Amino acid sequence: MYKILKAEQLAANIYLMDVEAPRVAKHCLPGQFVIVKMDEVGERIPLTICDYDSEKGSVTIVFQPIGASTTKMKDLKEGDYFEDFVGPLGRPSEFTEMDIEELKKKHIVFVAGGVGTAPVYPQLKWLHERRITADAIVGAKTKDLIILEDKLKEVSNLYLTTDDGSYIRKGMGTDVLRDLVEKEGKHYDVCVAIGPMIMMKFVCLLTKELNIPTIVSMNPIMVDGTGMCGACRLLVDGEVKFACVDGPEFDGHKVDFDLAMKRQQMYKSDEGRALLKEQEGDTHHGGCGLCGGDK
């Protein structure tokens, strides 16, 4: 059992929890995720790690209630428990494997949208602890949906924008990035984009135009989190990959976003899963148990 040490609502329909999980916290690195399960019959939910404290033995998760399990999860309070809290899973950010002195020479920009702000924070924090302060562009539909602003200010050069112009400036994260490069003369060696699929697609279209190598996190399409269900199957440079075991981070300029988004919609229906099974053959997996691909 894994005790909830803190539970709070960050914004409309966005929740944060600190969970007591010493063994997970000891091995966490930015970019990885955990799988949580409320009880014996609950759904297994993959969530990217927002923060971790190896000394305190805690891991921070941020989530939006979407399905039945996450809707129930939002009602958990401090002192309640998760049945399972498995991790860290997935490959950590490539920054953690680079030579620090070489990393210090790079100019890095992060672009986050919505709940994608949560997995951006631990990467910025990790870099800042090594005296590398990156730029961070955070966008939201409106001021009330901006999360972790104070924490982000501590570890990055923060630029905020809102779709409706209710806070700081009006526009998308891509508008800010273009202005930083074309109007302020900023140069970036790498961009990390994390957020809704459509947002990451348009960030990649812009960074390809601006010739900025870009990393994206495909966590939004994960369902099972172990590579069994096949929900997070995608094409990267023409090769079949699964976000949960091969990622969740990939070269954004090589990801087929249109196919991934189309597949994400098809996977939601029985008919769609059956068609995917027929189209994808041996690479479909089908461990979800819903389309018959596991038989």
Image (cartoon, grey):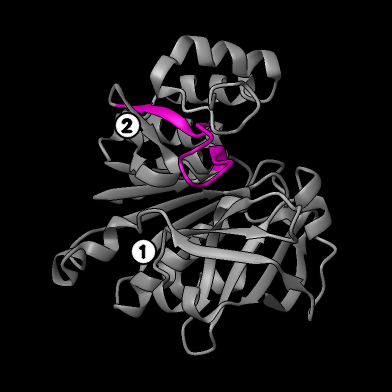
Q: Quadrant of the N terminus?
A: bottom right
Q: Position of residue 222 (x, y in %)?
A: 54, 41
Circle 2 residue: 253
Taking depth in this image into account, of 276 and 98 the one nearest to the observer is 276
Circle 1 residue: 134
Q: Amino acid at mark 1?
A: Ala
Q: Residue 208 vs residue 272: left or right? A: left
Taking depth in this image into account, of 30 and 156 the one nearest to the observer is 30
Q: Position of residue 70 (x, y in %)?
A: 75, 52
Q: Residue 263 vs residue 182: left or right? A: right
Disc sitting over residue 155 in the figure: none
Residue at figure coordinates x 72%, y 54% from the top left: 145
Q: Is residue 157 above or below residue 117?
A: below
Res 123 quadrant in image: bottom left
Q: Is residue 205 above or below residue 6?
A: above
Q: Quote the CA–CA distance across marks 2 and 1.
A: 21 Å
Residue 129 in view (yes/no): yes
Residue at figure coordinates x 25%, y 35% from the top left: 211
Q: Amino acid at mark 2?
A: His
Q: Which residues are magenta?
A: 220-236
Residue at figure coordinates x 47%, y 41% from the top left: 218
Residue 148 in view (yes/no): no
